[in-house]
Image (spheres, rainbow, N blue to C red):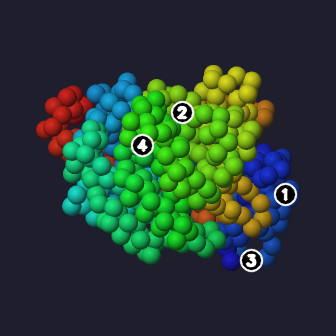
């Protein structure tokens, strides 16, 4: 099998359960897994690819636990900026009516490509918009992820209640039947779901938003997930508005509704989890239910701050998510990591997670949330998913002290030099190796402009962004 020897790293931060660090060490890969970590390694006989890691920090690849890549095409729209969650949804859902396979591919390429360029090697995606008449949108995402070379966990979601049934922000032509959602989810599992070690694609199931879903779809997706042993995902406890809607529709808080519906356990994970009580925090920890902390989105939409210190103290599974780029305006894991540290310092002070804890959330924590035991930390037998950070650059001079703190507090995408996924180099010197960036960017801009022009017929204010 082909071997890769990465030599002379300043630091290797394994993020393993013991927090092992190596200084001035090497890392030996065989095909798609790690063979050995330590000083002065020898690759042995036969051909070997050698990567010089002098001046570099090596970490596991980041794991993104929540995203909507199609939203990458509705960023920086002036009429959506500055809004809280519910009015923001009113603006963007009308644009989502234009979604088609071409736009899904464009959003996946830029969303997942940006993740790779910022050190992310595995990403979940929450694809819940399937306009009536469109087909195989999740397939298009999967194809784009394979082209880029990123490890992918897409979830097939849908919307079952629209404007005519009381959900004011969802046009009726985005509503699907439970039968159609479940049938397509089963097809995706049969076609793409790979349970083998080092799997590059695992299918999950998802709801759009629990306050506006039918009991039927909540129950049927739960039953299908348990039957086929796949994960379920959705938003939960994101805003005060969600609490009010849930009390009105279900007579209880959102967490209690999902608990009654059987959506807690190791096969379930939720994004945001901002508006939670002490009892609800313990429920997550006691049941092994995962949390995707999305600090940038929660700040952008004025939703609040997730109770990260309480989740960590309770032993809950918690990772990081960039959320849909429209409520973040980037798919930048480096930015998410830094702002996770900062907003938690602002909110929780001395109880906030350390730089090492934040880095662990972005790696091993995210892997735990997605139910993976083969990614998230570096050790023999683990996946060859790793990032080389160049901290020898001028920008970081004077800050080359603790390597974890340098990545979390001073780091930005300029620091990401090389990214390997499944043993293959997919980012080299900060540039994607699998697609031509300039040509792809031109096509994505053209597709985005066409979408906004069509949507501006219904929302004339969008003309100011064209």
Depth order, front residue of 46/286:
286
* Label 1, residues with CA under 10 Å away: few <14, some 14-19, many ≥20: some
| Gap in angstroms between the C-alphas marked 2 and 4 | 17 Å
Residue 375 visible, this angle: yes
Q: Are marks 3 and 1 in contact (CB under 8 Å)?
A: no
Residue 342 visible, this angle: no
Q: Residue under circle 4?
A: 250
Q: Residue under circle 3?
A: 46
Q: Residue at x 55, y 39 (%)?
A: 273
- Residue 137, image quadrant: bottom left
In the image, taking residue 214 as reference, residue 303 lies left or right, namely right
- Residue 100, image quadrant: bottom left
Select label 4 or label 3 by which is in front. 4
Q: Residue under circle 1?
A: 38
Depth order, front residue of 335/183:
183
| Residue 421 horizontal/vertical position (percent) | 59, 60
Q: Residue at x 55, y 50 (%)?
A: 259
| Gap in angstroms between the C-alphas marked 3 and 2 | 57 Å
């Amino acid at each position: 099998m082909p071997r890769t020897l990465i030599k002379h790293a300043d630091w290797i931060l394994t993020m393993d359960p013991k927090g092992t660090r190596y200084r001035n060490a090497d890392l030996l890969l065989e095909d798609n897994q790690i063979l050995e970590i330590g000083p002065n390694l020898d690759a042995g006989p036969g051909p070997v690819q050698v990567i010089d890691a002098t001046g570099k920090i090596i970490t596991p690849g980041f794991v993104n636990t929540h995203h909507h890549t199609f939203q990458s095409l509705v960023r920086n729209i002036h009429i959506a900026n500055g809004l809280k969650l519910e009015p923001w949804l009113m603006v963007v859902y009308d644009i989502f009516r234009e979604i088609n396979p071409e736009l899904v591919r464009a959003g996946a390429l830029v969303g997942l490509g940006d993740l790779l360029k910022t050190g992310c090697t595995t990403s979940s995606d929450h694809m819940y918009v399937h306009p009536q008449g469109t087909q195989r949108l999740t397939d298009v995402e999967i194809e784009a992820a394979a082209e880029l070379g990123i490890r992918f966990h897409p979830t097939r979601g849908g919307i079952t209640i629209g404007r005519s049934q009381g959900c004011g922000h969802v046009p009726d032509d985005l509503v699907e039947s439970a039968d159609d959602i479940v049938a397509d989810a089963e097809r995706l599992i049969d076609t793409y779901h790979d349970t083998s070690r080092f799997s590059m694609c695992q299918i999950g199931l998802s709801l759009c938003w629990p306050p506006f879903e039918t009991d039927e779809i909540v129950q049927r997706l739960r039953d299908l997930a348990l039957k086929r042993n796949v994960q379920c995902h959705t938003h939960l406890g994101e805003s005060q508005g969600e609490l009010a809607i849930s009390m009105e529709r279900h007579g209880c808080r959102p967490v209690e509704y999902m608990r009654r519906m059987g959506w807690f356990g190791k096969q379930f994970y939720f994004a945001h989890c901002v508006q939670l009580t002490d009892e609800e925090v313990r429920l997550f920890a006691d049941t092994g239910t995962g949390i995707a902390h999305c600090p940038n989105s929660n700040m952008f939409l004025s939703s609040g701050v997730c109770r990260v210190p309480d989740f960590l103290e309770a032993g809950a599974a918690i990772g990081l998510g960039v959320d849909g780029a429209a409520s973040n305006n980037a798919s930048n894991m480096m930015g998410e990591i830094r702002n996770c540290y900062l907003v938690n310092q602002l909110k929780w002070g001395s109880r906030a997670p350390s730089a090492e804890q934040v880095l662990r959330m972005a790696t091993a924590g995210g892997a735990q949330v997605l139910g993976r035991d083969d990614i998230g930390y570096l050790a023999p037998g683990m996946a060859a998913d790793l990032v080389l950070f160049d901290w020898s650059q001028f920008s970081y001079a004077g800050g080359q002290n603790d390597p974890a703190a340098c990545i979390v507090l001073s780091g930005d995408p300029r620091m990401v030099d090389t990214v390997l996924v499944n043993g293959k180099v997919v980012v080299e010197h900060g540039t994607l190796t699998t697609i031509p960036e300039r040509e792809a960017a031109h096509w994505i801009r053209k597709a985005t402009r066409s979408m906004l022009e069509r949507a501006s017929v219904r929302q004339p204010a969008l003309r100011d962004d064209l």
